[in-house]
Amino acid sequence: MNAPIILASGSSIRQSLLRNAGLTFEAVTPRVDEESVRAALLAEDAKPRDIADALAELKATKISARHPAALVIGCDQVLDLEGALLSKPETMDQARAQLSAMRGKRHDLLSAVGICQGGRPLWRHIGMARMTVRPFSDDWLEGYLAPKHTLTFP
């Protein structure tokens, strides 16, 4: 008997990746307060890779407990800039500050995946992409962040 596969994510990009890999699956969005978990782990001095791993496992185990026969895939990514964890910016000012902080520096994108069944972890992996943001001018940054023009018709 083949176990059904569930992706514990509402991410359209993650769903597309699995579809492109030829997998048949159901996507179920886990109700996880990621910010609270992240803050609690940071308060305990957890490393960025451990935070990504914990969030991926939490998402998978939560959905797996409700669907015990399924193989449930949980994922998370964190960006580590010199030991600081960066999240998706919510405002233009946050984006400007983050990009400025990354200018000319190396950072690591940590991608964690965990598979659970019956509410228990079966497998996990953490991958890392090491990248460097090229040096850029303030003018380039402002141009990059500027709203893109849309065509209007009379």
Image (spheres, helix red, strand yellow):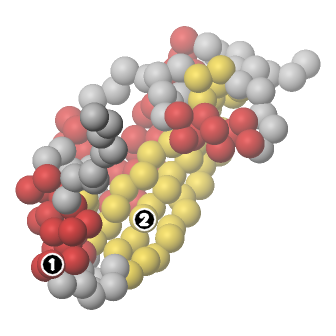
Please provide percent x and percent y for residue 116: 61, 32
Which residue is at a point 24% across and 84% down the rendered structure image?
A: 136
Please provide percent x and percent y for residue 106: 34, 82
| Amino acid identity at mark 1 | Asp
Please provide percent x and percent y for residue 122: 65, 39
Would you say 117 lies left or right of 136 here? right
Rendered-image quadrant of the N terminus:
top right
Q: Which residue is mark 1?
A: 139
Rendered-image quadrant of the C terminus:
top left
Please provide percent x and percent y for residue 89: 21, 51
Which residue is at a point 50% across and 68% down the rendered structure image?
A: 128
User: In the image shown, does 9 or 56 lie closer to the viewer?
Assistant: 9
Q: Which residue is mark 2?
A: 109
Circle 2 crowding by C-alpha within 10 Å: few under 14, some 14–19, many from 20? some
Would you say 21 lies left or right of 149 here? right
Q: Residue furthest left?
A: 93
Q: Marks 1 and 2: in contact by CB < 8 Å?
A: no
Earlier residue among tags 2 and 1: 2
Which residue is at a point 53% across and 34% down the rendered structure image?
A: 12
Would you say 124 lies left or right of 148 here? right
Q: Residue furthest front?
A: 154
